[in-house]
Image (tube, helix red, strand yellow):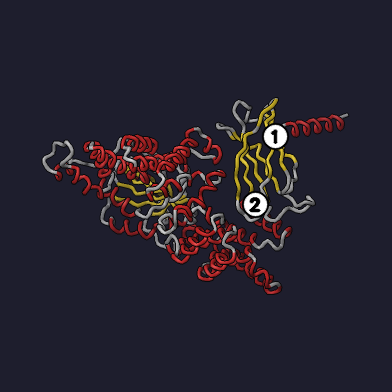
């Protein structure tokens, strides 16, 4: 009797588990030609999305060549069940389905599907490439090459993961072993040497081993043989990353020339969609606007243009003073996606993303207005961006640009007092470069001071900012084992740098930061502190080959909460009373001048 009762209970539990599955995908083992049926049951107790808002599915398709195609679809709700049908893109290898509304995600309903060959026995080539970035990359690599021994591109992707996740020496040993394995294969089958995946692996492997000249040779072979392939785009990104890490320079001119050729002649090439390519080429005046449109407009129309690049083509139009009406429309549409919150949930963006990207889009919109002599519109857009930025981590990055633009608009309108007020804010924040502009405006503004120098002497940094807040206390241990906390440094200006040994832009900034420390070495009231999450062992290895003059501390708990960021590098200047004087997120070429100006203005 007890046995029967136990079986009955287990049977009921099994039924409940099946019934409690909020999302269902049919077929469970799809092939590339399949149309997938997706459903979400809003009436179950564990359903987080109850159907009061439109339910969407975020469809992320990982293709066989490692590229990604994303799109979103609204589910149609009938009798508590929301459903849709989708046709898998050609050459899909793996698909992830994520369910959400404008206000909520249901991560427990996420579905992941490996795509199979027509026999539904063997996964298609590339089915495990995304899993390389999961918790078991070694297993994913073995499964991929077991099913498809000729997928040499899997080696390139795996090598990149090894270099990121493993001890540097262990990673190099393993990478060297993989390259030797491919050498043996190519000795018996010379045709392998012309395979795009094989060539990409040679480039990536040699770059990760520090052999940049050999890696570059393989990259150029890829440029010539496979200009449109995803393997070429991947190899370029990895090579350029390692070059930047080694040389602290963005891109070599001969590499830029190759990229330029591909951009102009192969607008659908995978490399054209690479995050940095637009930035590398946007100032190349001999690339016609039409070439940029051929490359970028299809990404806008298909929804493939990522959220952080929505301003790219409008910015090009603004820089070239062309199609300003089109630029204005595109920017307004992009801002609209943030204002109705649709883009936030498509990409899982947070408040920090909103502050940065909406401010930039508004800044671009203000530039359009200024170019069209619509001064009031320029002022309104710049002011809206400033309001969004205040108190954010990117305030130091973009606030000076916005104040400068708004001041220009006021000046062109003849409102010299308001123009001077914005210049005052810039000057007080440490931007001494505005002095000449202020001097030109001084006779035109209605000010009570007898001379410009008298006026300038009244601008003290103590009343510089209305938006300042303080930072929570933190503590940690420096490389010598000494404890340190922010509260111990009250009365001093503290220059903070959040960084990591795996952050290439952080490393690239170090020579300029070291120069800054040296310039203030005789100022006891200025302290330079670098905070990292790396452990001491990794730091010791890192500093065997690099110098960083900041006082480095680690083991700082809750850095994300304290500094309100997940990005690196971050720079903050803390005043003598613990107030945040300025902050900047991300690498910047003017970091030395930026920090020096803030420090000098507040000493």
Residue at the disc numbered 2: 63
Give residue 510's position: percent from left, percent from top. Answer: 39, 58
Give residue 358's position: percent from left, percent from top. Answer: 43, 39
Left or right of 499, for residue 128: right
Q: Is residue 469 visible?
A: no
Name the residue at the right extreme: 1
Nearer the observer, 271 or 577: 271
Left or right of 369, for residue 132: right
Circles 2 and 1: CB atoms closer than 8 Å: no
- Measured along the vertical axis of the image, is residue 475 above or below residue 196? above
Left or right of 167, for residue 44: right
Q: Is residue 9 visible?
A: yes
Q: Secondary structure at mark 1?
A: strand
Crowdedness of circle 1 by 10 Å Cα count: few (<14), some, many (20+)? many
Quadrant hosting residue 66 = bottom right
Give residue 73's position: percent from left, percent from top. Answer: 62, 37
Residue at the disc numbered 1: 39
Q: Quadrant of the image for the N terminus?
A: top right
Q: How many marks?
A: 2
- Measured along the vertical axis of the image, is residue 287 above or below residue 33? below
Q: Residues under labels 2 and 1: Cα distance?
A: 23 Å
Q: Earlier in the sequence, mark 2 or mark 1?
A: 1
- Measured along the vertical axis of the image, is residue 254 above or below residue 4? below
Q: Secondary structure at mark 2?
A: strand
Nearer the observer, 169 or 269: 269
Left or right of 170, for residue 14: right
Crowdedness of circle 2 by 10 Å Cα count: few (<14), some, many (20+)? many
């Amino acid at each position: 009797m007890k046995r029967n009762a136990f079986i009955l209970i287990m049977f009921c539990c099994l039924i409940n588990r099946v019934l409690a599955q909020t999302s269902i995908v049919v077929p469970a083992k799809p092939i590339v030609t399949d149309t997938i049926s997706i459903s979400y049951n809003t009436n179950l107790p564990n359903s987080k999305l109850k159907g009061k808002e439109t339910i969407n599915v975020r469809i992320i398709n990982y293709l066989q060549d490692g590229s990604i195609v994303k799109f979103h679809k609204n589910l149609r709700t009938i009798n508590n069940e929301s459903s849709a049908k989708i046709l898998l893109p050609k050459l899909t290898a793996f698909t992830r389905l994520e369910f959400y509304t404008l206000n909520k995600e249901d991560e427990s309903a996420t579905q992941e599907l490996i795509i199979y060959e027509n026999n539904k026995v063997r996964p298609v080539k590339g089915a495990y490439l995304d899993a390389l970035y999961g918790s078991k990359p070694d297993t994913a690599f073995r499964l991929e090459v077991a099913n498809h021994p000729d997928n040499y591109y899997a080696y390139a992707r795996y090598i990149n993961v090894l270099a990121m996740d493993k001890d540097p020496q262990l990673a190099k040993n393993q990478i060297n072993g993989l390259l030797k394995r491919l050498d043996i294969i190519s000795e018996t089958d010379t045709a392998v040497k012309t395979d795009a995946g094989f060539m990409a692996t040679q480039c990536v492997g040699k770059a990760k081993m520090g052999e940049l000249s050999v890696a570059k040779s393989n990259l150029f072979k890829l440029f010539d043989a496979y200009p449109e392939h995803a393997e070429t785009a991947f190899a370029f990104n990895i090579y350029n990353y390692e070059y930047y890490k080694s040389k602290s320079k963005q891109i070599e001119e001969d590499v830029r020339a190759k990229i330029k050729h591909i951009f102009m002649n192969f607008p659908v090439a995978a490399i054209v969609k690479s995050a940095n390519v637009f930035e590398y080429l946007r100032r190349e005046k001999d690339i016609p606007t039409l070439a940029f449109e051929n490359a970028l407009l299809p990404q806008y129309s298909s929804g493939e243009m990522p959220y952080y690049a929505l301003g790219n083509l409008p910015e090009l139009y603004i820089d070239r003073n062309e199609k300003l009406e089109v630029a204005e429309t595109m920017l307004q549409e992009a801002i609209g996606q943030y204002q109705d919150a649709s883009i936030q949930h498509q990409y899982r963006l947070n408040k920090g993303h909103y502050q940065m990207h909406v401010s930039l889009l508004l800044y671009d919109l203000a530039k359009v207005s200024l170019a069209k002599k619509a001064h009031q519109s320029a002022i309104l857009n710049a002011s809206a961006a400033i309001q969004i930025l205040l108190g954010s981590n990117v305030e130091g990055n973009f606030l000076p640009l916005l104040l400068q633009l708004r001041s220009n608009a006021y000046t062109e309108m003849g409102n010299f007092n308001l123009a001077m007020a914005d210049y005052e804010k810039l000057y007080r924040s440490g931007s001494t470069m505005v002095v000449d502009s202020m001097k030109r405006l001084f006779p035109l503004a209605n000010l009570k001071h007898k001379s410009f120098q008298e006026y300038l002497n009244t601008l003290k940094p103590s009343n510089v900012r209305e938006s300042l807040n303080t930072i929570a206390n933190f503590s940690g241990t420096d490389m010598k084992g000494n404890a340190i906390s922010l509260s111990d440094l009250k009365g001093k200006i503290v220059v903070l740098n959040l960084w990591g040994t795996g952050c290439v832009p952080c490393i690239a900034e170090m020579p300029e930061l070291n120069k800054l420390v040296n310039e203030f070495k005789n100022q006891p009231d200025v302290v330079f502190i670098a905070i990292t999450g790396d452990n001491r062992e990794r730091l010791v290895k890192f500093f065997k080959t690099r110098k960083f003059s900041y006082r480095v501390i680690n083991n700082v708990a809750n850095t994300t909460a304290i500094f309100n960021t997940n990005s690196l590098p971050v720079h903050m200047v803390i005043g003598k009373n613990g107030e945040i004087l300025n902050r900047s997120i991300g690498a910047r070429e003017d970091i030395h001048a930026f920090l020096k100006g803030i420090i000098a203005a507040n000493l």
